[in-house]
Image (cartoon, rainbow, N blue to C red):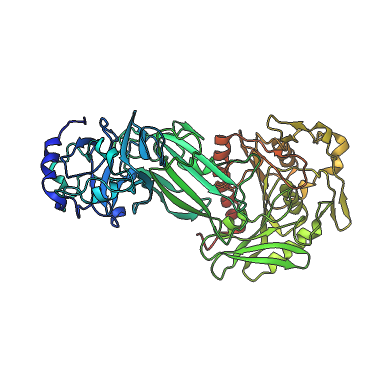
Amino acid sequence: MGMQGPGASSWGDNLGGGPQNWDGVSHPCPGCRGATGKARTGRNFGVWPVPAGHGVMGQEVSALAVPGLMIAKESSSLSLCRAHGPGFAQRGKRRGSSGPRGPISWWEGCGRAACLLPGLDWGQHPCSQTAVLHGEGAGCTQDWGGLGAPGSSSCSGPRAGEEHKERRRWVLGMPGLGDTWKRGVPAAGCTMVEVTVTPQSSLADRPVQIRVRGLSPSQLVTLRAWLKDEQGECFQSRAFFRADGAGEVDPGLHAALGGSYSGVWPMGLFWFLQPDTLFRRLVKRDVAGSPFRVRLEVFDGLCLGADPREQPLGSCEAERWYVGPGVQRVPVREGRVRGALFLPPGPGPFPGVIDLFGGAGGLIEFRAGLLASRGFAVLALAFFAYDDLPRVLAQLDLEYFEEAAELLLQHPKIRGPGLGVVGVSKGAEVALAMATFLPQVVATVWINGTAFLHGNPLVYKELRIPPIPYYTERILFTEVGAMDNSAIFADPQDPAYRASAIPVEKIRGKVLFVVGEADRSFNSKLFAELALARMPPESGRILSYPGAGHLIEPPGSPLCSNSSIRGTPRPVAWGGELQPHARAQEHSWQEIVQFLELHLGSVSVKL
């Protein structure tokens, strides 16, 4: 049996030439320089009978059609390098199969099943991301090594003997190659499936370009991105594409057909990462010490799950950093102030910014590192549940934040006289109070906060602003079991709560309100509008984003619509829709950076 086709006669003619037809066959792919004896098959390879004495032992099967494969004689192994062509629909180890096939590797792909050679296993090859069949079974090692040598032994190992006599002898042949098998002649058109990300190392808020090359025209593939955070939690995304006429995929030009998103999103594989474990949030903790390492892989066809046996056609790794080269992280423990100061490279002076997060407490630094990489000196400031600070937030002591502002402005690399504040959630409430009472604050970025004191009073010298209580009996549980807190706030327009309003009419600086209209934690848009109505004219503006949730962060952060946080009995619903939220983060981040530059002065360093 066997597949007849163009090149069959040439194949038979070449057999007579002995081993010199095989040794040293060159291969044009740079990734294969460590291997020998490689040749490209073209579109298919088949199985042909071999005259006695040539001895590669296989199974009597019809043609094994796997487009774009190559084979290799590499000492005593037969290599099928799938990175050098598409066509694999299924990969993995198949050793020791029981039944009539015996201990053979076999293949289910391209619509048909076919046995390859006895005792061959999938292994590793000098081409990265390849699959190799090692000849460790009966008849393979000696016979392949002696291919074409008249009189060579046709069988060795424990399976030699009577069982061998019942088998016909076969060799893998490649239709259409003809004389390209002769010594030193590379097979034409050999291409390797290649995944690249440019630049390979970048800041997490900067775009990169992903490209896949070496596919077949119109080939259906899956692009997958995944990383593990510092706790070992896996976050991943995937998208399905058809290659263009050149066999390439570029997510910046080609629309994803489905998967974690659809449409043209150059950064979709990064922005739509989601946790394998429900309620996990992707937050970089070790900001200065290491990047997130994102693995980018391409699979043939639709890859819907995470089967470890699925091997990619190609892959690469991208580094996503939260500090640029030369940025310094300096721990801060001065007086009562606790945090970390991020300084851009160079002598300065730099515009100063205080960065605040919300009700989870602790110290979160990733946004400060990214802002420092854009030329700002940024103090990531903790205000509870960190170091020796109070474990719970009983009240907002504005004198603590005033101390932090003065400490920052006293630093020799900080340009005064004013500074900026960025805050989200409870941190936005604090930021608005700082803008109201502290003259040092001239530029404030408020992200999804309130304009009233809620839950905790504010104290400053002789002043005390009472809080509006939370009505926790109004908590709703979402379909995934998270707490929707949007209804626990009383109507801030009720005259009974007028004393709890932050007196924003005293603000003398500028405020940028950033609102996610799909925020399920606060009615952020209402609070922003109420604050703006009471502020001096031209002192503030609102950026409002339909479909964006509560946690609007730099564009390197994927949407977190639900997560567990410190101090709550259940996970919290933050809201947001994937694509509108991603657009909001990209746009608002550029607006935030421009706002700070406008009101604090231009930066001297941009990384």
User: Which residue shows up at 46% across the image and 36% down it?
Assistant: 239
Q: The N terminus appears in which quarter of the rendering? A: top left
Residue 109 visible in the picture: yes
Q: Nearer the viewer, residue 51 or 370?
A: 51
Q: Residue at x 26, y 33 (%)?
A: 60
Q: Is residue 525 left or right of residue 19?
A: right
270 in relation to 606, above or below: above
Nearer the observer, 310 or 533: 310
- How many labels, in total? 0
- Asked whether residue 68 appears in the rendered view, the answer is no
Q: Position of residue 597 (x, y in %)?
A: 58, 55
Q: In the image shown, does 281 or 95 lie closer to the viewer?
A: 95
The image quadrant that residue 288 belongs to is bottom right
Q: Position of residue 204 (x, y in %)?
A: 53, 52
Residue in the image at 70% along x and 58% along y: 381
Position in image of residue 469 (x %, y %) = 85, 40
Image position, residue 266 (x, y; %): 45, 41
| Residue furthest front in the image | 162
> Which corner quadrant of the image does residue 390 belong to?
bottom right
605 is higher (above) or lower (below) than 226: below
- Using residue 4 as the reference point, say whether residue 465 is left or right of it: right
